Amino acid sequence: MEDPALLNLLDHRFDELAVETHQNLAPRTAVAVGACGVALLMLPWRVCAVWLAIGLCIECWGWFASRAQYLGRPIDRTAQLNFLANLTALIVNWFMLAFLFWQTREPDGAVCAIVIWLSIIGFAQTFASRTPLGFTVCGVAPALGMLGVALTAAHYGGMDRRPILGILFLAIGFAIAGARQTFAAGRKFYDTQHRLRDSEAQYRVLADNVTDIIGLTSLTGEWRYISPSVVTALGYSVAEFCALPHFSYVHPDDRPGVEPRIDQLLATGGTCTVEYRLVRKDGSLTWMETSFTLISDPQTGAPFELASLSRDVNHRKALEQELTQALESAEAGAAAKANFLANMTHELRTPLNAIIGFSGILKRSRDLTAKDERHARLISDASSTLLGVVNGVLDFSKLESGVFEFDAQPFHPADMARSVVMLLEDQATASGVSLDVIADDAISPLSGDAPRLQQVLLNLLSNAVKFTEHGGITVRVEQALTPDAGCRLRVSVTDTGIGIAPNQLDAVFERFNQADGSVSRRFGGTGLGLAISKRIIELMGGVIGVTSKQDHGSTFWFELVLPPAQIPIHAAGEAAAQSSLERPLRVLLVEDVDVNRELVRAMLEPFEIEIETAVNGAEAIDAVGNVRFDAVLMDIQMPVMDGITAMRRIRAMADPQISRLPIIAMTANVLPEQVQRCLEAGADDHVGKPINIAQLLEVLSRWTDEERDAGEIRREMSA
């Protein structure tokens, strides 16, 4: 017993036979009229007329019996039985015409009968063999009737029936063999069709229910399919959307970015993804991300269709906008922070310049009493401490913003450690604490940023001096080769101070943190030094750490791998140690603050330097145009005309002696971008405030050397 699915397939094939029968009604009618004309040659006209009338009635009946199948309307079992009866009547009518020809008992009548019977079998083979029921009605039943007539009915006298029967049997055999092949192929074909219909139905259910818009268009832009999700996404019905002009639904501002991409895809093939705004039916806008794919014929490789998958990305665009706004806010905050930091450091360094400068001059004065000299030294120490706080905040800000840069130069680790110890030796001696450096004589020069390492060591050593009230402090420098031909440098600072509790060790390198809140009140400090040291060492690729025992002292250390130096190392500070100039100089000091002008005069007075002053950039331009100077010390922030503008105008002067005049920016603007701005405006060098007299003298000496002009020095510095 066949299952319901097989019965449905047979019904479907039988309905297809009805469609083909309906389509061939006109040719069959014409053949029936022709067959009637032939029959008039051998049969009475009344018989022929009756046969033709019956045939035409059957054809009219068949037109109505197969009309529903032809139009694709729903078919019930009654309609199928009606068509079966019509098909049976049609075959019987043609069979009877062949029987009438056979009954003439003439050779020509027998030939006509056989031809009609074989034509009926041919009709069954051609049209009805896809359905067993149709083949039975149109082929098997007429074939059996034909054999019965040939065996039993009257015939032309003397005619041998055996060849006729043999040929008829062969024809029936061919028809049956062909029908079997057709049945097998038809079953396979319809099974495949059934699976394809199921698969298509599944994909259509998927396409019709996804929220993304799935579309297929021809290469000329006509829509072949658009998923119903377009209704929810854009508000158009499928028919309305397909009727819109191509790309008219894309926002006008976005069309120039969409159409060229599609044209390029059609030319080169492949896929592309485009983001653009679509105009909904109500006029509102929605962001879409569409992936276009050019589909090619698998046989010929020729493109024939464009597939698109569009997804609503409004939520993502809103998030991107929020992120963009957050980024802009963060950048604005960073800019505000940078501006505040720049202004703060400038405002702090300007008075510190006077305090540190004049206190330094006072300390060197021979006219002070011991008590006054001590007061001057205390002022100098306190202002230096305050400068250290300002520098610490500035360094940490640069580390946080990622603008901290390193300059690798050859240096000697032992000399670097000794120079730092010398800076704090007086302070340690005053506290009754010994300060020693232990370094192996075999330590060799390395290449690294020595000033930054000095800064780290100075932070570690300053803390050791601050927190050690008795005993001693030891700086140990060690060096060992690494397998990759580098050198591992280890520097440690061991003290006999107050130590750190075990539960506080992990926090000592955090910013604005000290091991104990009372320490801040007792010893002072911002808690930034160790945090800055940690960041510097880590940015250099090293590690930093501490071991400590409360009330017994601490050991702070750092390690990093540096390459060996490739050039000879000179003693640290050799060049900067020169505190005198080779010849007298005339220098223009451009400074708007009276106390700073007085300070620079006092600092340079012992060194045969003639100072002339200007209080703004405009006066500086007039001065260099009237008097020959060896150098210009230029402040930046001034009224009337700032230093940046003044330097640019001096560099633009036609007189080469003036345009090439060495200009040294001497300002409290010390941030990297501020220094770079000075250099871009035409400054040859930069000296930050508070002014270090040794640095200032070294810069003046370098830029006023008569043996080398400013252009040569600039070329050397840029190289």
Image (tube, rainbow, N blue to C red):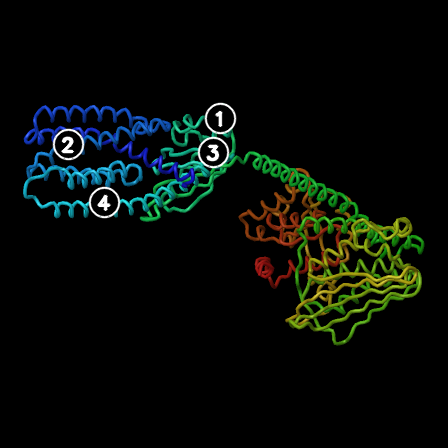
**Amino acid type at image mark 2:** Leu
**Who's the residue at 59% across and 36% down the image?**
321
Mark 1 element type: loop
Q: Reading the chain from its start, which is encountered first: label 3 or label 4?
A: 4
Residue 288 marker? none
Report the residue marked by disc 4: 175
Mark 4 element type: helix
The answer to whether residue 465 of the structure is visible from this angle is yes
Alpha-carbon span between mark 3 and mark 4: 46 Å
Packing grade of label 3 (10 A; few <14, some 14-19, many >=20) is some
The label nearer to you, 4 versus 1, is 4
Alpha-carbon span between mark 4 and mark 2: 21 Å
Circles 2 and 3 in contact, beta carbons < 8 Å = no
Q: Is residue 296 left or right of residue 38?
A: right
**Amino acid type at image mark 3:** Asp
Residue 97 marker? 2
Circles 3 and 4 in contact, beta carbons < 8 Å = no
Alpha-carbon span between mark 4 and mark 1: 59 Å
Q: Is residue 631 left or right of residue 313?
A: right
Report the residue marked by disc 1: 235
**Amino acid type at image mark 4:** Ala
The answer to whether residue 358 of the structure is visible from this angle is no
Report the residue marked by disc 3: 208
Alpha-carbon span between mark 1 and mark 2: 65 Å
The label nearer to you, 3 versus 4, is 4
Q: Is residue 236 left or right of residue 503?
A: left
Q: Quadrant of the N terminus?
A: top left
